[in-house]
Every structure is written in structure tokens, then in C-alpha cells.
Amino acid sequence: MKPFSRILVANRGEIALRIIRACRELDIESVVVYSEADRGAAYLDLADEKICIGPAPSENSYLDISKIIAAAEISDVEAIHPGYGFLSENPQFAEICQSCRIQFIGPTVENIRQLGDKAAARELALKVGVPVVPGSEGVISDEELAKAVAREIGYPVLIKAVAGGGGRGMRVATDESTLSGAFQAARSEAEIAFKNSDVYMEKYIEKPRHVEIQVMADSYGSVIQLGERDCSLQRRHQKLMEESPSPAVDDDLRLRMGTSAKELTLAAGYRGAGTIEYLLDPDGNYYFIEMNTRIQVEHPVTEMVTGIDLLQEQIRIAAGSPLRYRQEDVRIQGHCIECRINAENPANGFSPSPGMITQMRVPGGMGVRFDSHVYAGYTVPSTYDSLLGKLIVHRETREEAIRTMLRALDEFVIEGIHTTIPFYREVLNHFHFVKGNLDTGFIEEYMIDA
């Protein structure tokens, strides 16, 4: 029995296409919304229906809740899939869906509210016994309290917005003389980005890895964890490359991190796909930092090493079905690497590079996957995120995955715009990357021009 008959896709680009494909394989009709900037995009024709919801600016289209709900009602859908970004972690949107008797394909409203607030999520982790980075017990309301907490936990410290993500609303203070500026800058940026200036403070872990655990939970108390993704290769807190398994995680650490992730997910009464994010210090200690209450950009990495279709499972769970997998069914096989191919110019500070793709040749062969909505003749808009697609390779070992990714990047041709393809060739050939010696400062330390 199929979980739904008709779903609205409230997103754009490669994730919209990914959801449309999942619906097609589940024999579910899909309705996709689009802005004027995306009119004519090829993936729209793969949906059963398409509805224009406004002009290019996202606040007038993909972030306009009233327009999306109206599209859902006139197209008579049973559920809405928000993808990632835009409204995917907006509790108000999830609540409105609920009041309109439209199923939100994601966690519950309560899940989003509790876990979307990083300070509240931290408190839950402490209650459950999951390791957390030493820091404030809650929101820091003024500079004097910030100074007191910083003295207690020791410098350097990281000031973080309680809402949102993507590296916004985050500042490092190395000593008391830099704390005031960092505190005010974090609050100001958080207010602009998330309409919420609240911040909290953590001890700044030097040279950490960013390692996350994919979890999936149903409405009946069953939770599984599907192994880790190492997301340490970042630029300005933005992930660029992910791999699984992490070269820094052995079987014992993997079990401990996975068990903590399951315990936290269970304690939250969570439903659906989610990601528990940790920092891993050079001594092998891990610390919970946040939970993302949505499907991740990098979800294909987990799909490749487990063989589990996360989008289809997410849709089934939202429809009320129990998890189809037990923990013992999850097996990590081989090694997967994902490169986010962005329309950016690495030689010019990763500046955006919108425009028409005049020629495109996509790599293929054994173990190569490319999730993308773009093609030759497609015009990359300047309005949205620069992600063109995700190049994913899956091989038996990490060494083989690196060689296959290099081969795939050499085959990859995109002309008319700048992309991050040359940057990844440089990373994959770097001695320290090949050896697995990574932390979140890798690019700043070794890639001088980045």
C-alpha cells in the first residue's frame, strides 16, 4: 500500500528532483511549486503538476507560507515535503500544515521547536547524558554574563545563535578583549538571519572534526542510527565535502557515538529523519553540538554505504508506517565521498558565478552518482544557493573512492560559469587529505587561496 496518493514538493533544484523521483518510485503523484526564476527548469516537467508561487525572491515564493499552503489546497495533496533549507525547520509552517490537515513530511512541531533551539537541545543532551561541549546553561542575555561564563569555561570561546545554522550568528573570542565585539556581532547577525538575537556560549574546541550521525525514527518508539558522516572539510562553517565512514572513527567510537545519538533521539520523542551533529576532538572525545530536524544535503552518502533510501523511508514514516529496518539490519559497506559542486569561483574567494551553462558533460562509470537538476542551456540564477549538484562516489575502500572521485572530476565538464571542480582536485591530491588528517580548519590551514 502506498503511503500517500499525492505530495506537494515545497522546494527547488536538486532536492526537489530527488523528492519527485522518490514519489515516482512509491507510485505517488507529485506537485512541485516554483518561482519565476525557476520557470522552465527541466525537473518541473517530471512532476505530475507544477504551480508558480511568485517572483524570484525566496521571501515572496519558497518562504511564503500562505502561497505554499494555497498551492497545496488547490492541488488537493495529502502531504508536503519541505526538503532542506527554506521552510524545512520552521515550526510555524509545520503547525499550519497540521491545522490544515496536511501531513508535514518531517518531525513533529514539538520536535522542531525543542531541537531547533540549540540551547534547549543542549539541555536535553545533558539530561540524557550525551557529552556536550562545556558552555553556558542557556541563553546569555548580556555581556557581563558572557564574561563570567567565559572565565569559568576558559578561552577561546564560541558564541552561537540558538536558532538557525549555516555558520551564521557564530563568533570566536580568544580573550576578554575580543569578547564584547564577538558577542555583539553574533547577536546582530543572528537577528538579521533568524529574527532571533539569542545566543549561548561554548568552549571553542581547537582542531575538531565535524562528525554527524544519521538517525531515523518512527511514531512507535523505534529508532535506528545509520552510521556517521565526516563533514570536516568546510569553509567558513559551510560544508563542502562529506565522507562515510570517517577515517577518524573506529568501531568502538562509532558504537558510542551512535548509541548516544539514538538515546537523544528517543528522549526527544523524535519522528522522521534527523542528524545528530558532534565535534570530535584530537583525543577522540565527542561532543554534541546540535540536531538538524530535516533531511540533510549530504544524505546520499549514508544511502550509498547502507543501501537504504532515506527519502522513501522518510515519506513512509510520515504516513504512519513503522520503520522497516531494525538496528541489526544496518550494515556499513564500502566508502563514500561526496563533493558539493557549486557555481562559485574558488580562484576569486569562492565568489558566486551565476549564468548560463553552455556545455556540460557528466561523469559516470562504476560507483559514480550525480544528483543534480542542471544541464547544458540551464541558467543558474543569482537569487538562490549556488549548489549545482552533488558528485558522489562509492567504492570498497577510501583509497579507491579518492581515485574514483579524481577520475570523475577529470571527466566532469561544465562551461559558461565557474565551479568548485578544480578546488576538489586540489583537495583530493593533498597529502594530509589522502592520509585522513582532517579538521574543520583544513582549508584555512592548507588551501591558502581559499
Image (spheres, helix red, strand yellow):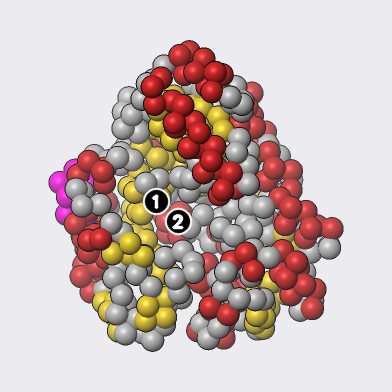
Q: Is residue 85 above or below residue 226?
A: below
Q: Which residue is mark 1?
A: 239
Q: Is residue 290 above or below residue 204?
A: below
Q: Which of the marked residues, 2 or 1, is nearer the chain's N terminus?
A: 1
By secondary structure, the bulk of the magenta-drawn segment is best described as helix
Which residue is at 19% across, 44% downward?
446
- Percent of width and height locating residue 176: 41, 19
Q: Amino acid at mark 2?
A: Glu
Q: Which residue is mark 2?
A: 298
Q: Which residues are magenta?
A: 428-435
Q: Alpha-carbon distance for marks 2 and 1?
A: 9 Å
- The answer to whether residue 4 is visible is no
Q: From the viewer's side, name the closer residue of 237 and 294.
A: 237
Q: Are marks 2 and 1 in contact (CB under 8 Å)?
A: yes
Looking at the image, is mark 2 or mark 1 nearer the viewer? 1
Which residue is at 45% across, 56% downward?
298
